[in-house]
Amino acid sequence: MSHSHGHGPVDSGPARPQLARTLGGVVAAIAVATGIAMAILWPSSDDVPRDIDPFGGEGVSTVEATVTSLEPFDCGSTGQVDIDSTPTVAGSCANVTAEVKSGDATGQTAEFQLNSTNFVAGTVSEGDQVRLVQYEIEDGSFGYEFRDFVRGFPLAALAIVFAVLVALIGRWRGLFALVGIGVTLVALATFVLPGILTGQSPLLIAVVGSTGIMIAVLYLAHGISIRTTSALFGTLFGIAFTAAAGAIGTDWSHLTGLTSEDDALLLATAPQLQMQGIVAASMVIAGLGVLNDVTVTQASAVWELRALQPFASAWELFRSAMRIGRDHIASSVYTLVFAYAGSAMTVMLLITAYQRGLVDVLTSGEIAQEVVRTLVGAIGLVLAVPVTTAFAVWLAPPAQEEPEEAGRRVRRPENA
């Protein structure tokens, strides 16, 4: 493993080829072990459950259309429902006319109804591009139902803006980070998600997949160097700890992984799934981004401090880096809490509207899952800081001998 770093200004210190080769061998061994594990766990396409698409059966298809008019009408929706019924919003419904833009009926007029929930919320208006479920009627004509919006252009535009800004501001490092995102998406789509669907241990799949992803993205985004390797060691510790704590916390808190209709539908589609294991696996995957950020920052901090304090002992270097790490811990923990709170915002609003007590809210299945995920991720994050710092101090360039002047050693600044 070369000790040079082609994408950053940090001084790597004097050449240490023996250490670089040793670390290269260790990382290569980890990478090979991860590759073998992925090969053993790699899901067969025949074992991945595939439910029948309800919108792709015989005589049923999905088409795109442009809304041309909406006419409200009273559909008797009061918002009051029985306990087994699906809640709706009180208000009017709407008859909608649209021009079909794809499929066999291109150019024809499609008529469908919007329920009170979609109409009152104002989500559909004239000129919108929508997706409709098109189904054949006995007389050869077509009937239509609203399915969703066409979001291809805005999503593509946002992705392009993001990629351009990352490339312009981050330059080569930004470009390699984009490649890392691609590697992550490919790993998730081809290994992690199909592997879990086949009924294998979700936590094992998540750990193996996360390890492979981190090895690839760290060296892609930050270059092959001893400094990056120290960040990798800290990251792997964080993954291992989060996995262990996630498994214990999930079982201890009796989290079932069945807190929504989507969870129940997933289990009905793939009965072999280990739903509790999926909760623990999600803790590993969800914390990767912040964990990577913290470990890379700590490793960089140690190298910068070593360049500024060439005579500082290992313990002094560790203490200086931990002062930076403590600030980073505080901001990163907030990041985790805000991220999970945002993802569960709808559930929290609904529970608040039901006027349930704080303890009742926090211990409910929906929120408790997010609480445990946040706490496990935060604990792993906090512990990764001193561990990464220790690895970085151990692997950073050694302290230099202090020069002597007039027969005495130069006094080191107190804060060195």
Image (tube, rainbow, N blue to C red):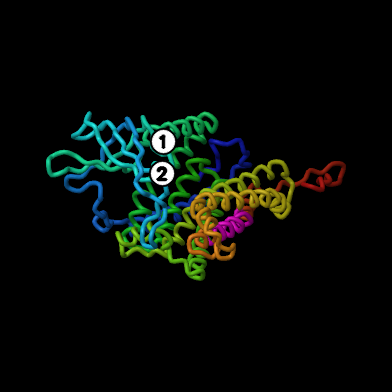
Q: Please determine whether, in this image, residue 29 is positioned above or below residue 245.
A: above
Q: Which SS class for mark 1?
A: helix
- State the image coordinates of residue 112 (x, y, percent, origin top left): 28, 40
How far separated are the C-alphas under marks 1 and 2? 20 Å
Sort mark 2 into few (<14), some (14-19) or many (20+) by Cα contacts within 10 Å.
Answer: some
Q: Nearer the viewer, residue 143 or 167?
A: 143
Q: Please determine whether, in this image, residue 95 is positioned above or below residue 192.
A: above
Q: Please determine whether, in this image, residue 326 is positioned above or below residue 172.
A: below
Task: Name the front one of labels 1 and 2.
Answer: 1
The part of the image, by quadrant, that contains residue 142 is top left
Q: Nearer the viewer, residue 194 or 275?
A: 275
- State the image coordinates of residue 309 (x, y, percent, origin top left): 73, 44
Identity, as a three-letter code, of the amino acid under mark 1: Leu
Residue ID at (73%, 52%): 316
The part of the image, by quadrant, that contains residue 143 is top left
In the rendered structure, does residue 374 fall within the stretch colored magenta?
A: yes
Label drawn at residue 155:
1
Query: Is residue 35 rendered to the left or right of residue 384?
Result: left
Residue bearing the label numbered 2: 183
Upstream in the sequence, badge 1 or badge 2?
1
Residue ID at (50%, 53%): 344
Sort mark 1 into few (<14), some (14-19) or many (20+) by Cα contacts within 10 Å.
Answer: few
Q: Which SS class for mark 2?
A: helix
In the rendered structure, does residue 315 fall within the stretch colored magenta?
A: no
Residue ID at (55%, 65%): 360
- State the image coordinates of residue 40 (x, y, percent, origin top left): 33, 59
- Answer whether residue 237 is visible to the viewer in this image: no
Identity, as a three-letter code, of the amino acid under mark 2: Val
Q: Which residues are magenta?
A: 372-388
- Answer whether residue 213 is visible to the viewer in this image: yes
Residue ID at (44%, 49%): 213
